Image (cartoon, grey):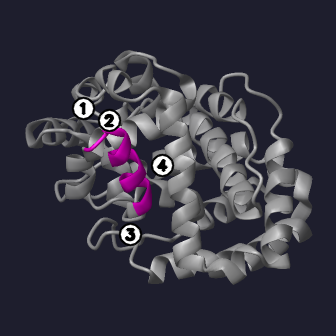
Amino acid sequence: MEPSQAGRSARSMELLHSVAYFAPEIAGELTTLGVTEPVPQYVSSRSAAVGAVGAGVVTALFYNFAPRVIESAVPEVWAVADPESITAARLRGVDAAYRRVLGQEALDSAEMAEAAALAARAARAIPGPEGRPLYAAHADLPWPEPAHLQLWHALTLLREYRGDGHIAALQTAGLSGLEALVTHTATGIGFAPEPARRLRGWTKDEWAAAEAGLRQRGLLDRRGELTGEGFEVRELVEDLTDDLAVAPWRELGEDGLERLLDLALPWRDTFVDSGVLPDGLFGPRYGDAR
């Protein structure tokens, strides 16, 4: 299996994991615990598996957030709710979101059980935790029992494993967290620039300074678009990320991966149609492989 094929497939299923950051059920569960603001909700729910660590550790794990945004949430959030309670609330919220959007018939189906088994097979084939701290923390969590939560958990492990490798690729390419965010928005595939800047906590001056630095390096043009060299750098990052993430997907083989996609993509589309993604959040090429 080519790494690029596995990478495209992983990204196409990513929303089935990332509903945990958008669905109102998760926010509701966290609000019940006393974590009421969006930034602490995101930061705590994603990093809780690591434990009650400080802002420096979470900033390193997340990479493209402004440090002060993390510092506004950590460690104070752990005084409101401990990591174990937040992790449990996140799982309850995911469960409720899947039930609402996909319906009980889909959750109880043989297709869901098959998809969960395939995704779990891939996740359990991840070579190990070395150099993958956010993956390692989630891998230490117990597997949930219902098939749809096993699917979500498996895709979460695969996503965080890939994400840890992506940070290594970005550092290899010499892109800081902010530069990584700016160049990714310039591709049109990820967040749109203004939501990316706002959600990750960077000021307009900081964003402009990063753009100026990237122009000096020949990676951005005056319109804020990637130059040819800028596209080459982003391709390097994505190629290396795919190389570092391919091992578990090779366990499934091409037939197994194709079957998982056949099963999972209609559910992803159902989530998209449900309006779980806020309008205007993503760029014009969102959903493209690269």
Comparing 30 with 64, the one in front is: 30
Would you place residue 155 above or below residue 49 in this image?
below
**Which mark is first along the chain, 3 or 2?**
2
| Residue 193 quadrant | bottom left
Q: Considering the numbered disc 4 on the image, is that residue within a helix, a strand or a loop?
A: helix
Q: Residues within 10 Å of mark 1 (few under 14, many from 20)?
A: some
Inter-mark Cα distance, 3 to 4 = 25 Å
Which is in the foreground here, disc 3 or disc 4? 3
The question of residue 35 being in magenta is answered with yes
Q: Residues within 10 Å of mark 3 (few under 14, many from 20)?
A: some
Q: Considering the numbered disc 2 on the image, is that residue within a helix, a strand or a loop?
A: loop
Whether residues under marks 2 and 1 lie with C-beta atoms below 8 angstroms apart, the answer is: yes
Give the residue number, with chain letter if any, for mark 2. 65
Inter-mark Cα distance, 2 to 1 = 7 Å
Q: Which residues are magenta?
A: 25-36
Residue drawn at point x = 87 percent, y = 52 percent: 121
Q: Residues within 10 Å of mark 4 (few under 14, many from 20)?
A: many
Residue drawn at point x = 43 percent, y = 33 percent: 62
Q: Considering the numbered disc 1 on the image, is that residue within a helix, a strand or a loop?
A: helix
Which is in the foreground here, disc 1 or disc 4? 1
Inter-mark Cα distance, 2 to 3 = 20 Å
Q: Residues within 10 Å of mark 2 (few under 14, many from 20)?
A: many
Q: Residue furthest front?
A: 32
Q: Residue furthest left?
A: 205
State the image coordinates of residue 251 (x, y, percent, origin top left): 90, 51
Residue 234 — which label? 4
Residue drawn at point x = 37 percent, y = 53 percent: 27
Which is in the foreground here, disc 2 or disc 1? 1
Give the residue number, with chain letter if any, for mark 1. 69
